[in-house]
Every structure is written in structure tokens, then in C-alpha cells.
Amino acid sequence: MSNVLTIDSADYIKHQFEFLIDESRILGLVAGFGSGKTFCFLRKTLINHIFKKRTDENVSNGWIIYPTLDLANELFVEPFKELLESVNIQYDWNVQKNRFKTKYGYIRIYTLEQPDRMVGANLTYAGIDEFDTIKMNKALQCFRKIIGRLRGCDNPQLYIVTTPEGYKATYNIFVENKKEGQRLIQAKTTDNPYLPQNYIDSLRQQYDERLLKAYLNGEFVNLTSGQVYYSFERQKHVLKQEEVYQASYPVAICFDFNVYPYSVVWGQKLNSENVRILGEWVSKAHSNTYEACDEVMKRLPNDVDIIVYGDASGRSGAASSNLTNYQIINNKFTNYFKAVQYKVPSSNPSVRDRVNAVNAVLHKDYIRINPSCDNLIQDLEQVTWNEKGNELDKSNIKRTHISDALGYFLNIEFPLIDTRTQHQPRIL
């Protein structure tokens, strides 16, 4: 067999070829079942093993990471041996050290479950397969370990391959926190023309619509059974283009007083079946009610009537002042807006009541959201219940707060039961 490695677009599916030739510092491939991810991952590793050499030595130094060693042995070690043999590259496999050695350099195998064991090394490349199959905190810990060591040559690369398993580490890296030098390639199972049709048919028979979006189409969707806002559909509830406020209706301004991130969302109730969410502000650092009010006033004109909604806890003293949060809001807004009214409960409804109110409004199709409300849209897609299913999962500090703010508004205006006898809104 030839010992020359060639890459011809005719030999690969389009997304595979793009992945193999891409030199982005951080590269991702997210694709459905049967789309040829592992096949591509093996060849990407061989390319980098041969060509990404250390600046101080004429050899490469790479890490390959799988969720477990058993999976690494099954999907990488034995197939990679076959690949090396197919191009006449002699190798030494040290099972104790989980390490390949060839004349081109070294490849060390690690696991996502034990990121603490990843030590030393100036890496010229690293590859992670099945990245989203473990908990996000461990995956991100592994990611940070690699990035800190990706300094062994002038053009090092981290490449990540996975089936989308919800809004996990891959989404966090390539969508929420995308930076320069990163690229995400997404592909569908149906992009692979070599799969038999009955394979795709079997997927459609086994999985519901939500799972098919992930496992067939390679899309990021919430796969957690405890998804909180299960009635939300981006295609249905998010407007195609931005809308502005209508002057004949008051603007609802809804607060969540969490210090980081501090969250405010605003919109209008046009009638009993029509709500428009027009804007949001979410702090990028620790913040307070003074700053939140200033940011809202920058974004809204002063010739409107407003109604303030929010967390009942805002009646207690604010962290940055002896005044309560609502006293600060009142001092700020009464000097700016035309008229200010409050619909704040004396005590909060249960989380379930608030969530059910939001889901009911979504299900009845009463609400539309401006596409610029990125944080709110992500909350509605991503917030889940905790493992016990009795509280919102707050492990991601960015999530839950702005959807809480929306919930305070919708629970007052669209109560599923007459909560006003228990949580009477009142003007402060």
C-alpha cells in the first residue's frame, strides 16, 4: 500500500473534506448518527500527527481524548492501527502508557472523565471524540486543560467531534462563547450518500421529532427529559424581524434581581391573546438595580407609560443600598417615564405555578419574541429541572434568571388559577 497520504475531495463527503482541510485553531464537527464522524476523526488525527510538528523538535505531540478508555480502544486505538498500517507507517503502541509512537511523533490517549490526569506537554494538536456524552463541567475542564497546552507549534489545533447531545460543552464553546479562530461544521445523517435508506428509516421510526433533530439533523436541541419550557418553539415564537413598541400600550418592564447576571426583559401586552417581548438587558458582570435602570432608560423612550413586574424579594434592601430594589426603581423611573405603575406580588408564586403560566402562554401561541432577545431565547430552550425534578437546574449561572423575569410578568397577566387572592399585586 502507498505510504503517501493524499486528500482528495472526491474521496470524502463534503463535511468530511471541509473538516480535514480546515486549519482553524479550534474546529468542531457536529453531525447525526452515521454521518462518518469517527472515520473523519481518525484521518484528521493522522494528518495532524504527520504535519503538526513541534518548533523545538521535528516530531508532533498530540492528545486524543474519549469519554472512557474502553470507547477509545473500540473507536480509535484498533482502527488507528489499521489506518497506520494501510499507509505503511510503523508504530509502537504502549498499552501501559496509552501511547502511540511513530517516526512522526507521539499520540497519548486520555479520558474526559479524568481531566486531572492531563498534565505536562506542549501540544501541537489534540482531538476529542464524543465530546458531549459527559457532564458539561468535566468537558469544559478538559477543554481548558488542552487550550492551556496548545502551544507546541506555530499552528496548533484542537478538533472536536460529537453527536449533539443537547446544549452542552460543544454549544457552549462554538455558539455561546465563540471566539476568533473557531469554526463549527454541522452535518446531517442524510448527507452521507453511502448509508442504506433503511438505516435512516429506522432512525425515524425509533426517535421522536426532538431526538431526530439531534441524531438525524445534527441540530442542537434540548434532550433532557426535564426541559422546563417544553412548549417553546423557536420557529413559532421568535419573530422573523425586530418589532418596536406601540405607543398606545404601556411597556411592561420585568426584573430579576440576581446580582450576576442581573436580568431585565420588557415588552407589551397588546390584548388578552397577544404579547410582544421587545428587548432585554443582561449584565456581563456583577451589577445592581441602579445600573439596570440606567440601561433600560437608554433603550426606551421617556414618553411611554410603564408597568413594573418582578420578584417579590425586591421589597427587601438592595445589596448596594439601604433602599429596596423597588424604591430604587421608583426613584429612577418616575423622573424619566410618563407614568409608572407596579404589579408586584406580596409574595412569589411557586416556581411550578410560574413555569406553568409561561408554558400555557407559549402553548396557546399568545407570545412573540424579538430575535435580539438572545438570552431569553436560550433560557426558554435550555433551562431544565434538576435531577430530582423539583427545582430549576442552576448549574449554569447564565441560565434561568431572564426567564424568571418573564415568568413574573406572565404569571400576573395570565394566571392559570386566580393567584391574585394570594399574591395581590399592589402599587408601591
Image: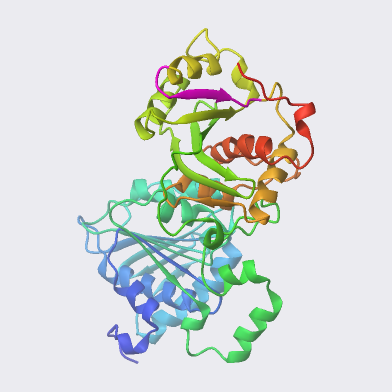
Asked if the magenta segment contains residue 340, the reply would be yes
Q: In the figure, is residue 257 to the left or right of 161?
A: right
Predominant secondary structure in magenta? loop
- Residue furthest to the top in view is 322
Of the pair 422 and 202, the residue shown nearer to us? 422
Of the pair 55 and 283, the residue shown nearer to us? 283
Q: Is residue 338 above or below residue 211?
A: above
* Residue 162, horizontal then vertical, whole percent: 50, 65
Asked where in the image residue 73 lies, by quadrant, the reply is: bottom right
Q: Is residue 259 above or below residue 148?
A: above
Asked if the magenta segment contains residue 367, the reply would be no
Q: In the figure, is residue 406 to the left or right of 300?
A: right
Identify the image quadrant of the N terminus.
Answer: bottom left
Residue 230 in sight here: no
User: Residue at (39%, 77%) from the top-left corner?
Assistant: 16
User: Residue at (43%, 31%) from the top-left corner?
Assistant: 304
Report the magenta residues as a range.
Answer: 335-344
